[in-house]
Structure formats: C-alpha cells, structure tokens
Image (cartoon, rainbow, N blue to C red):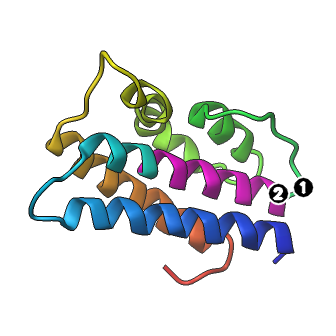
Amino acid sequence: MKPLTREWVRKAENDFKVAAQILRRRKDVVPDAACFFCQQCVEKYFKARLIESEIQFPRTHDLLLLLNLCVQVEPLWPAYARVVDAMTDYAVDFRYPGHSATLREAKMALKHCGSLRAEARRSLGLKS
C-alpha cells in the first residue's frame, strides 16, 4: 500500500473512532458531530481507494462524486449511491445553524459508515 493511502486510512480510522465514541456516551451525545465524523470517514476511505488506484480527484466533500470516481475500480459500489448522497450533507449542513441531526440519524450514519468502511478496507486489502 502506498504511504499516502496509509495516511488517508489512518485519518479515516480516527474519524470512525470519534463518531463511535460520541454515540457511546450516555449523556451529552452530539448527533451533529457524530454525523460529521461519519461523513469524514467515508470521504477519506474513498480518497484512499482513489489514491491507491492512481485516480485523480478534486478537492471536495461530495461523496457521490468520489463514489462515481471509485466505480472505475469498484464496479459494485454504485449500490451505495443513495446512502452516500445523503451522507454528503453531513459535511456542511449540520455544522451550521438551521439543520440539526437527530440521535436516530446519527446512529444510522454510523451504521452506514461502518458498512462503507468495511467495504473500503476489504478493497484495500485490510482487515475489517
């Protein structure tokens, strides 16, 4: 694995851990933050996959755009398009006034993030 790919994976794993820790709290759960870190984890795994395959990508938080680039090497990943499209909003919307995530949304985000994370790790030859 390329060193830059490893870096993206390490950062993605940190985001995943933070999201999971936020949702494990019994008090003061912050669903907005959990959703944000789930989005960040998926974004970084997509970028890791693209870097490993030497596919150029723009500087973006748009998960659907990144997923569509990944399809060049992962032809089954379009199955995640609906989930990924919804998760893109977590990068910005919940970070500003006007939108707030519910605990239920945050738990679903972590579930979807976990599935996408496992798929990306398998694709990169890593253990889930």
Query: For this rendering, which residue is in front, 110 or 82?
Result: 110
- Secondary structure under badge 1? loop
Mark 1 neighbour density, 10 Å: few (under 14) some (14–19) many (20 or more): few
Q: Residue at coordinates 40% horizontally, 23% vertically from top-left?
A: 96
Asked if labels 1 and 2 touch by Cβ distance under 8 angstroms, the answer is yes
From the viewer's perspective, is 5 left or right of 12?
A: right
From the viewer's perspective, is 45 left or right of 4?
A: left
Query: For this rendering, which residue is in front, 85 or 27?
Result: 27
Q: Residue at coordinates 31% horizontally, 39% vertically from top-left?
A: 32
Q: Which residues are magenta?
A: 38-52
Mark 2 neighbour density, 10 Å: few (under 14) some (14–19) many (20 or more): many
Q: Position of residue 82 (x, y in %)?
A: 42, 33
Q: Residue at coordinates 88% horizontally, 43% vertically from top-left?
A: 56
Query: For this rendering, which residue is in front, 98 or 83?
Result: 98
Q: Position of residue 24 (x, y in %)?
A: 20, 67
From the viewer's perspective, is 119 left or right of 23?
A: right
Task: From the image, tell me which residue sits under label 1.
Answer: 54
Q: Position of residue 36 (x, y in %)?
A: 42, 43
Asked if the stretch drawn in magenta spans residue 51, the answer is yes
Q: Quadrant of the N terminus?
A: bottom right
